[in-house]
Image: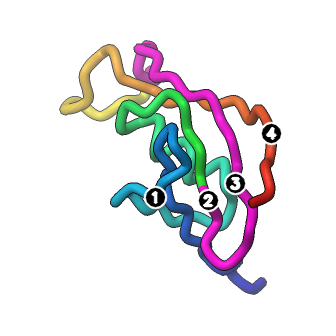
């Protein structure tokens, strides 16, 4: 089974300018989850090498840790959540 190639996604600011944040993942949703876990809410990711911009809404929820958590993990953990709102073409 071949591994899927990783893609690089550049976070755009509200003026559609590139920022210094680059997230790597095979899928845009994975990159958006990484951005959401770092506190970004309006997530616009430009896929390098294409003219696509993936648009997401992100948030971070505080949830209970799983029952089989290791002893060092606190009872409440932060979990990123994203919803895709569309794809734009430059």
Where the N terminus falls, by quadrant?
bottom right
Instruction: Based on the picture, tell me whether residue 88 belongs to the magenta stretch.
Output: no
- Tell me if 83 is positioned left or right of 59 in this view: right
The tag on residue 53 is: 3
- Graded by Cα atoms within 10 Å as few (under 14), some (14 to 19) or many (20 or more), the crowding at tag 1 reads some
Q: Main secondary structure of the magenta part?
A: strand
In three-dimensional space, the C-alpha distance between marks 4 and 3, rounded to whole angstroms, equals 9 Å
Give the residue drawn at x 48%, y 54%: 17
Segment colored magenta: 46-67
Q: Earlier in the sequence, mark 4 or mark 3?
A: 3
Q: Secondary structure at mark 4?
A: strand
Q: Position of residue 84 (x, y in %)?
A: 74, 35
Dot 4: within a 10 Å radius of its alpha carbon, few (fewer than 14), some, or many (20 or more) residues? few
Tell me which numbered mark, 2 or 3, is placed earlier along the sequence: 2
The disc, 1 or 3, on the residue closer to the chain's N-terminal end is: 1
Residue hosting label 4: 86
Q: Residue at x 41, y 14 (%)?
A: 62
Q: Nearer the viewer, mark 1 or mark 4?
A: 1
Residue matched to label 2: 46
- Residue placed under numbered mark 1 in the picture: 18
**Residue 54 location, x and y as percent?**
70, 49
18 vs 75, left or right, is: right
Distance in Å between CA atoms under marks 1 and 3: 11 Å
């Amino acid at each position: 089974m071949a591994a899927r190639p990783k893609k690089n996604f550049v976070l755009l600011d509200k003026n559609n300018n590139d920022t210094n944040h680059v997230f790597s993942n095979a899928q845009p949703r994975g990159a958006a989850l990484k951005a959401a876990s770092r506190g970004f809410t309006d997530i616009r990711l430009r896929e390098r090498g294409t003219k696509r911009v993936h648009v997401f809404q992100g948030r971070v929820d505080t949830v209970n840790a799983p029952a089989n958590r290791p002893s060092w993990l606190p009872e409440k953990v932060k979990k990123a959540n994203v919803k895709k709102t569309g794809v734009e073409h430059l």
